[in-house]
Image: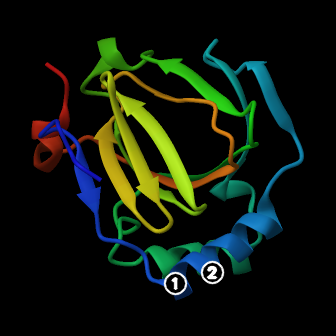
Amino acid sequence: MDIVDKRIASLTKLTDHQIDELLKVNESVMSDIDITKIDEHNIPCHYYMTKYLNWPSKERHLLIENLKGNGYEDSISSWMLNLPAEDGFLGVTDIWNENRFRSGIVKSYCLSDECVINIEGAVYKLTKGEGISFSLTMTHSIPKSPNDQKWVCTLHPYEAKYHHMVKM
């Protein structure tokens, strides 16, 4: 994955074992609630999502163990996002652009063969286990794909160490 914007970072690739464990968590906790049309932020979308706080303790522990050193330590929220083949997508997301110092940093890992995300107009294609980090102040979306896309994501508070990632 080629990074074209210094505010975006490539993350350490997950091992096959970590991917397998996180996919088990995904299968165990994924909601059957289809979020379609408009989400709570009025963003057009079609995906399935589950948030960490709703998970049993075993699955929370597995997430922590498999993201240690890969972005979990200072996270304030975690979730998994599944986008079905052909029609799953996340529309253009720019709602945090005006609240740049209250917006966090997202670290997202691809758990499927390929995941695609658009950030600030650039297309990033990730393969299984690759991760990307960016500020929510950056306009982003996930386009439709012929393949399922599975993501595990963590949200981190804005701190001085992330200042270079914030859209000014």
Q: As shown in the figure, which amino acid type bears the numbered disc 2?
A: Asp
Q: In the rendered view, would you say 53 is above or below 129? A: above
**Residue 55 percent coordinates (x, y):** 74, 63
Question: Residue visible at 56% across and 29% down?
Answer: 143
* The image quarter in which residue 102 lies: top left
**Which one is nearer the viewer's eye here, 110 or 134?**
110
Position above or below: 6 against 112: above
Residue at image mark 2: 20
Q: What residue type is labelled 1?
A: Asp
Residue 74 x, y percent position in the rendering: 34, 61
Compared to residue 25, the image places residue 82 above or below, namely above
Tell me which corner region of the image, top left, top right, bottom left or bottom right, holds residue 119.
top left
Q: In the rendered image, which quarter contains the C terminus?
A: top left
**Residue at x 31%, y 25% (from the top left corner):** 138
On screen, residue 6 versus residue 27, left or right, reads left
Whether the residues at callouts 2 and 1 have beta carbons within 8 Å, the answer is yes
| CA neighbours of label 1 inside 10 A, class few (<14), some (14 to 19), many (20+) | few
For label 2, the SS is helix
**Residue 137 image label:** none
Which residue is depicted at the point 81% across and 69% down?
Answer: 28
Q: Which of 86 and 60 is in front in this view?
A: 86
List the residue tagged with mark 1.
16
- Is 166 left or right of 135, judged from the image as shown? left
> Could you say where residue 82 lies in the image, as x and y percent from the top left?
70, 48
Q: Determine if residue 134 is in view.
A: yes
Q: Which residue lies furthest to the front in this view?
A: 146
Q: Picture quarter containing residue 167?
A: top left
